[in-house]
Image: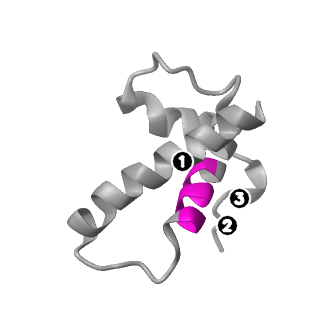
Amino acid sequence: MVDSKAKDLAAMQVSLQATALRLHSIESRSSVEQIAAEVLRLNDAVRAGAVGRLHYGDHPQDFAKALLLHADSSNGKVNP
């Protein structure tokens, strides 16, 4: 498992090095290693949070509806 994570991190670093400057036209102040680790961490967190709530086959158009369905009521809008 550790080997897989190391391979994922290395692949993400290569991807970022190949695209970041071209896409954003600026060099990051953060290291590519740091950015790659954060991208993978956030992706894992989103995947874990979506389990049982979103299905990969769902239509993108239904995403907002799913967010509302699974929203925490404590985040509701308060009308004065």
The answer to whether one can see residue 70 in this image is no
Which portion, as a residue range, is magenta?
33-40
Please state if 18 lies on the left or on the right of 35 as rendered: left
- Considering only vertical position in the picture, is 34 above or below 25? above
61 or 48: nearer the viewer: 48
- The residue at the point 66 percent across, 27 percent down is 53
51 or 15: nearer the viewer: 15
Q: Amino acid at mark 2?
A: Val
- Considering only vertical position in the picture, is 75 above or below 80? above
Please identify the residue farthest to the bottom as the structure is shown. Answer: 29
Q: Report crowding for label 2: few under 14, some 14 to 19, many 20 or more residues within 10 A (C-alpha).
A: few
- The residue at the point 76 percent across, 37 percent down is 2
User: Residue 77 has which mark?
Assistant: none
**Where residue 77 sits: x, y (%)?**
63, 62
Q: Nearer the viewer, mark 2 or mark 1?
A: 1
Question: The C terminus lies in which quarter of the figure?
Answer: bottom right
**Where residue 79 sits: x, y (%)?**
63, 68
Q: Which residue is mark 1?
A: 10
- The residue at the point 46 percent across, 16 percent down is 57
The answer to whether one can see residue 65 in this image is yes
- Considering only vertical position in the picture, is 46 above or below 34? above
Q: Report crowding for label 1: few under 14, some 14 to 19, many 20 or more residues within 10 A (C-alpha).
A: some
Q: Which residue is mark 3?
A: 75
Q: Nearer the viewer, mark 2 or mark 3?
A: 3
Q: Which residue is mark 2?
A: 78
- Whether the residues at callouts 2 and 3 have beta carbons within 8 Å, the answer is no
- The residue at the point 64 percent across, 35 percent down is 47
Q: Amino acid at mark 1?
A: Ala
Q: Amino acid at mark 3?
A: Asn
Check disc 2 and report its element: helix, strand or loop.
Answer: loop
Check disc 3 and report its element: helix, strand or loop.
Answer: helix
